[in-house]
C-alpha cells in the first residue's frame, strides 16, 4: 500500500473513531440526564406536598407573619418562601437563584387571591401563592433540574457541558490514535530512509556492491530501485574508467614503443649515411627511402593521436560537400590497388552503374577507407591479400561494403572492434607505427559525424558495411 493510502486510511480511522466516541458520550450523557430529570420532575409534582404547602399558607405562621418559621416548614417539604408587598418590595426570601428566576418569570405576574392559595404548575416546578394582609406570600418548589457532574444544573448548561465533554473525548481519541499511527508510520518511513542513508555512506566509502534491500510496495520502493540502479551505473562507470585508464597507460607505452622502433631505424640509416656506410648512390638512395618510410609511419601514428584528441574534445572539423560516393570509391580503389600490387595483393570493385550522391567530407571519408585498408594489411593474415569494395543504394542510404579475404575476428570480439584503445591481441605490437587501437574508433566517429552507420561482421573474412545518407536534393531523383 502506498504512503498516501496509508495516511488516508489512518486519518479516516482517527476521524471516524472520534465521531463514534463523541456520539457515544453525547448519547450516554443525554440518556442519564433525561432519566434523572424525569425522576426529579415526578418528585416535584408530589400532590401530598402541594396540599401541605397550601395548608401552611393558611396556618398560624402566616397570620403571625413569622416568615422564618413558615420558611422552615416549607423547606421540609421541598419549597422555599418569598414575601413581597403589594407594591413589589421584598420582605423575605429564601429562594435560590434558580427559584428566584422562575419566580420572576411566572410568580410576579400571577393573580394571587386573598386567603386562598393558588397552585401554578409547570414542567420544572410547582408554585403555591396567596395574599395575606397586603403581602404576596409565594412558595416555590425546588426546580426539577437534573443532576450532572455531582450537582443540579439547568438543561442548557448540561447541553453545553455535554458538547464540551464530547469534544474533549474526541480530541483525546484523535490524539491517542494519531500518536499510535504516527509512531507506526514513522517506523515504517524510517526503515527505507535508514537503509538509503547506510547505502549512501557505503557509496561515499566507495562500496557499490551492496544493493538497498527494501521489500515495500510504496513510493520508497521506486526510490530504492533508482538508488540501486545508480549504484550499478556508478560501479560500471568506475570499472569503465579503470579500464579506460589502463588503456591510456597501455597506449602511452605502445606509442612509446611504436615511435621508438621507426625512430631508431631512421637514426640508424641516417647515421649510416653520415658514417659513409652507404658508399654507392644506389645504396644511399635505399637508405633515404627506408628512413623516409619510417618517418611517414611516425607521421601516421601522430596523425591518429591528433585525430583522437580532436574527437575527444569534439573539435574534429567536418566540411561536407556534394560528391558521388561511387566515383570517390573508384578513385580510392585505384590508389589502394597500386599499393597492394607491390605486396602481391589486389583491390576489386563492384558497383551498380548509377549515381550515388552524398554530402561528405572527402578527406575524412578517405581517412576511414584508408584506416580499414591499413587494418586489413596488418591483421587480415591473408597472402595474397584481396580487398573487395562494393557500392550500392539501399533506400535513402548509399552503402559501401569493405571486405577482405582474411581469417576474420573471433565472434565475441566483434562488438569491441570500434572501442578506443582496443586490439584483438593486446600483446601484439605494431609493425608499421600503428596498433594503438584508435584506427577503427576514429573511423566509426567520422561515419557517425556524417549521420551514417558502420557495422562489422565475419563473412569469408572481415566485412565492414558503411551507410551514408543520400543527398537530400537527389533523394527523389
Image (cartoon, grey):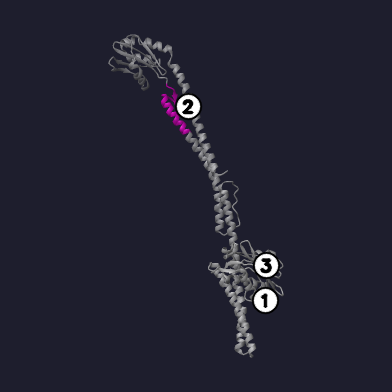
Secondary-structure class at tag 2: helix
Figure quadrant of the N terminus: top right
Q: Nearer the viewer, mark 3 or mark 2?
A: 3
Secondary-structure class at tag 1: helix
Sequence-first disc among 3 and 1:
1
Figure quadrant of the C terminus: bottom right
Question: Which residue, given by chain and number where applicable, does mark 2 sit on?
Answer: 29
Measuring from the top left, give residue 48's x and y in whole percent.
43, 11
Measuring from the top left, give residue 151's x and y in whole percent.
42, 25
Which one is nearer the viewer's eye here, 82 or 368?
368
Sequence-first disc among 3 and 2:
2
Marks 3/1 in contact by CB < 8 Å: the verdict is no
- Disc 3/disc 1 C-alpha distance (Å): 18 Å
- Residue for point 46% across, 19% down: 38
Residue 113 numbered mark, or none? none
- Above or below, comparing residue 236 to residue 387 in the picture: above
Seen in the image, is 430 located left or right of residue 6? right
- Residue for point 59% across, 54% down: 228
Question: Which residue, given by chain and number where applicable, does mark 3 sit on?
Answer: 463
Question: Which residue, given by chain and number where applicable, does mark 1 sit on?
Answer: 340
166 magenta-colored: yes
Measuring from the top left, give residue 110's x and y in whole percent.
34, 14
Magenta segment, which residues? 145-169
Marks 1/2 in contact by CB < 8 Å: the verdict is no
Within 10 Å of disc 3 (Cα), the crowding (few <14, some 14-19, many 20+) is many
Q: Does the image show residue 207?
A: no
- Residue for point 71% across, 73% down: 382
- Above or below, comparing residue 135 to residue 393 in the picture: above
Q: Residue furthest front?
A: 477
The answer to which image quadrant residue 307 occupies is bottom right
Amino acid at each position: 500500500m502506498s504512503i498516501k493510502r496509508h495516511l488516508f486510511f489512518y486519518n479516516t480511522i482517527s476521524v471516524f473513531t472520534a465521531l463514534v466516541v463523541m456520539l457515544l458520550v453525547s448519547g450516554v450523557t443525554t440518556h442519564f440526564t433525561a432519566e434523572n430529570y424525569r425522576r426529579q420532575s415526578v418528585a416535584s409534582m408530589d400532590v401530598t406536598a402541594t396540599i401541605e404547602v397550601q395548608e401552611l399558607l393558611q396556618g398560624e405562621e402566616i397570620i403571625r407573619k413569622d416568615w422564618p418559621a413558615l420558611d422552615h416548614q416549607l423547606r421540609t417539604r421541598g419549597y422555599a418562601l418569598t414575601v413581597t408587598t403589594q407594591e413589589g418590595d421584598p420582605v423575605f426570601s429564601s429562594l435560590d437563584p434558580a427559584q428566584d428566576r422562575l419566580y420572576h418569570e411566572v410568580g410576579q405576574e400571577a393573580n394571587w387571591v386573598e386567603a386562598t392559595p393558588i397552585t401554578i404548575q409547570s414542567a420544572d416546578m410547582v408554585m403555591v401563592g396567596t395574599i395575606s394582609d397586603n403581602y404576596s406570600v409565594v412558595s416555590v418548589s425546588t426546580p426539577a433540574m437534573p443532576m450532572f457532574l455531582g450537582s443540579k444544573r439547568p438543561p442548557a448548561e448540561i447541553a453545553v457541558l455535554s458538547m464540551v465533554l464530547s469534544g474533549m473525548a474526541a480530541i483525546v481519541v484523535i490524539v491517542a490514535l494519531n500518536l499510535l499511527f504516527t509512531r507506526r508510520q514513522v517506523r515504517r518511513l524510517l526503515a527505507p530512509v535508514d537503509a538509503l542513508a547506510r547505502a549512501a555512506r557505503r557509496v561515499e566509502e566507495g562500496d557499490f556492491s551492496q544493493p538497498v534491500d527494501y521489500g515495500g510496495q510504496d513510493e520508497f520502493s521506486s526510490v530504492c530501485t533508482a538508488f540501486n540502479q545508480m549504484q550499478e551505473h556508478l560501479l560500471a562507470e568506475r570499472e569503465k574508467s579503470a579500464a579506460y585508464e589502463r588503456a591510456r597507460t597501455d597506449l602511452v607505452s605502445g606509442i612509446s614503443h611504436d615511435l621508438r622502433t621507426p625512430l631508431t631505424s631512421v637514426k640508424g640509416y641516417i647515421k649510416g649515411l653520415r658514417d659513409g656506410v652507404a658508399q654507392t648512390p644506389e645504396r644511399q638512395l635505399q637508405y633515404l627511402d627506408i628512413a623516409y618510410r619510417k618517418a611517414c609511419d611516425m607521421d601516421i601514428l601522430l596523425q591518429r593521436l591528433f585525430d583522437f584528441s580532436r574527437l575527444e574534445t569534439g573539435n574534429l572539423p567536418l566540411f561536407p560537400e556534394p560528391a558521388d560516393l561511387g566515383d570517390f570509391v573508384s578513385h580510392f580503389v585505384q590508389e589502394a590497388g597500386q599499393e597492394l600490387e607491390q605486396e602481391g595483393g589486389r583491390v576489386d570493385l563492384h558497383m551498380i552503374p548509377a549515381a550515388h550522391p552524398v554530402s561528405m567530407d572527402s578527406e575524412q571519408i578517405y581517412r576511414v577507407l584508408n584506416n580499414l585498408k591499413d587494418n586489413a594489411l596488418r591483421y587480415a593474415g591473408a597472402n595474397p591479400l584481396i580487398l573487395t569494395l562494393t557500392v550500392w543504394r539501399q533506400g535513402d542510404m548509399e552503402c559501401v561494403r569493405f571486405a577482405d579475404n582474411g581469417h576474420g575476428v573471433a565472434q565475441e570480439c566483434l562488438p569491441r572492434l570500434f572501442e578506443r584503445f582496443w586490439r584483438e591481441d593486446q600483446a601484439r605490437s605494431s609493425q608499421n607505427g600503428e596498433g594503438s587501437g584508435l584506427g577503427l574508433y576514429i573511423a566509426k566517429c567520422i561515419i557517425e559525424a556524417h549521420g551514417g552507420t558502420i557495422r562489422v561482421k565475419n563473412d569469408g573474412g572481415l566485412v565492414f558495411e558503411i551507410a551514408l545518407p543520400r543527398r537530400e536534393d537527389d533523394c527523389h531523383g
